[in-house]
Amino acid sequence: MGSVIDYSECPNCGQECYNEFYYKTGEEYIFCNSCGYNYSAEYKTNEYGGYLTKDGTDNYSFDNLTLEVKELKNPYCAYKMKNYGSIGFQCGSLSNEDEYYELRGFAQTNESVEFASVSMLVDGKIVEEVLVDNGPKVDSAGFIHDDNVYHFDDWVNHMLSNSDYTESELMEFELYYENLLHFDMNTSNFINFNQKNKY
């Protein structure tokens, strides 16, 4: 399915909001990260994700499908949450205060949550509240591993402290170092690389 992504003015708060339009199907999604305004126009589906037809047959032409429109015009807030080990944020809307307290309680008591915040429209202005900011995890060697990125310089320092390799030997591996692999995996790759270069 093809789509066009654009940014438009949020009809609720006036800030920039994300708009994705699927031009082959006519489905559309709008989301405001500032206030939580949410709009979707998508075809009705069953519990398995299959399209529901108007006449109950297997005729899936667009005129036999029902476009369902949902709109959260006055949301309580927008939320943004990131778990340790994930590469991005989960974003969404909360429609009432109960949902806000549920999310806040979850974020503040769940050890896997690295960061969580909400933003809402209050008296015509966007107000942001940070619920949790635990920062990146630090391993037993004192290295920060934010988003599971293992930096080459940290690996070199680790190897200099824990092996007999020289800095020049380690620096030769820089082009082959993979920063999404843990130090142990890169060390194993380095040993193979080093042995091949000796012969």
Image (cartoon, rainbow, N blue to C red):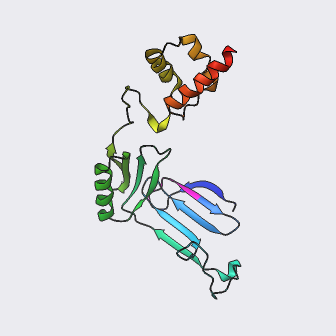
- Residue drawn 64% across the image and 80% down it: 65
- Residue drawn 63% across the image and 55% down it: 5
Q: Quadrant of the C terminus?
A: top right
Q: Is residue 176 above or below residue 118?
A: above
Q: Is residue 35 above or below residue 178?
A: below
- Residue drawn 69% across the image and 77% down it: 62
Q: Is residue 186 above or below residue 112?
A: above
Quarter-of-image position of residue 139: top left
Determine if the magenta segment contains residue 17: yes
Determine if the magenta segment contains residue 32: no
Q: Quadrant of the N terminus?
A: bottom right
Q: Position of residue 178 (x, y in %)?
A: 58, 31
Q: Which residues are magenta?
A: 12-19
What is the total number of numbered labels drawn onto the structure image? 0
In front here: 71 or 43? 43
- Residue drawn 71% across the image and 79% down it: 61
Q: Position of residue 19 (x, y in %)?
A: 58, 58
In front here: 141 or 78? 141
Q: Is residue 133 left or right of residue 194?
A: left
Quarter-of-image position of residue 158: top left
Quarter-of-image position of residue 161: top left
Q: Position of residue 126 (x, y in %)?
A: 38, 51
Q: Position of residue 79 (x, y in %)?
A: 40, 54
